[in-house]
Amino acid sequence: MILDMFSLKGRVAVVTGANTGLGQGMCVALAQAGADIVGVARRDCDQTKTLVEEAGSSFYQIKTDLSTMEPVEQIINGAVEHFGHIDILVNNAGIIKRNDAIDYTEEDWDPVVFLNQKFTFFLCQAAAKQFIAQKSGGKIINIASMLSYQGGIRVPSYTASKSAVLGLTRAMANEWAKYNINVNGIAPGYMATNNTQALRNDDDRSDEILSRIPAGRWGTPADMAGAVVYLASAASDYVNGFTLAVDGGWLAR
């Protein structure tokens, strides 16, 4: 049956930034499809744990700060020690810093590019090594952005890093497909999350954004559910290096 291709029963998914927003929503979606979840965050994931367990899956948190490279091995090794294997990685954790490009500083630039680009790549690499060692293949899903395609305003480091995520997703897909590792991305549109709080609080900017979205509303974490389950499942086995926009039609305008 076609719906069986979307089942994640017996799979283990590692999701970074799992405590809130899109990360929490994707944890719940993957759990509802049958996956057990390893949630990575520097804050407690108590609410996410409750929602995942209500969906009938197990939840294990790795509490760590992603501002250095140290957690890369800790995340993969910790997940494998707890569940015995991993099958899915969702690179969702990211930060944004807003300032006029003319005034942007290294302090604005470095932490954003580090987490959104460098850490993302090396966590993908660590997961791929584990998939290869397991001889199981695997699914890597990188969370990109509308600013993987556009320049944005007052967020040059975010635009640079999310543009890199789009390119790295393609590059990794080219090299790792031979190991049955699918590397794809999701580019969320303007979502009602912590990262967009400043935009939503600015009535003029919010109205400007909403006027361009054909769907006429901000997205929600639930809008990511179908995309992440599809890319994590056997239904996407012949999809590689593609970044799927979940944007209410923003890029179509």
Image (tube, rainbow, N blue to C red):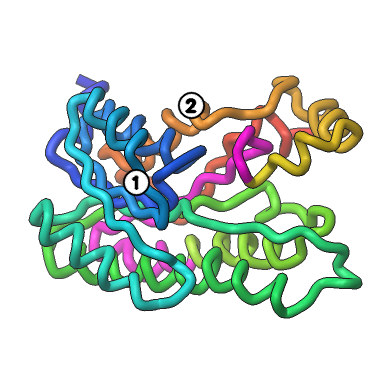
Q: Which picture quadrant has residue 117?
A: bottom right
Residue sitting at x 79%, y 28%: 210
Q: Nearer the viewer, residue 127 or 110?
A: 110
Residue 18, compared with residue 111, is above or below; it is above
Total numbered labels placed on residues in the image: 2
Q: Amino acid at mark 2?
A: Ala
Quarter of the figure that contains the N terminus: top left
Residue sitting at x 25%, y 24%: 55
* Residue 103, position as x, y percentages in the image: 88, 72
Q: Which residue is mark 1?
A: 238
Q: Which residue is mark 2?
A: 222
Q: Secondary structure at mark 2?
A: helix
* Residue 158, position as x, y percentages in the image: 68, 61
Mark 2 vs mark 1: give the one in front. Answer: 2
Determine if residue 161 is in view. Answer: yes
Q: Amino acid at mark 1?
A: Tyr
CB under 8 Å between discs 2 and 1: no
* Residue 10, position as x, y percentages in the image: 12, 39
Is 28 a magenta residue?
A: no
Give the extent of the magenta segment.
Answer: 171-194
In whole angstroms, how far apart are the C-alphas of marks 2 and 1?
Answer: 25 Å
Is 190 a magenta residue?
A: yes
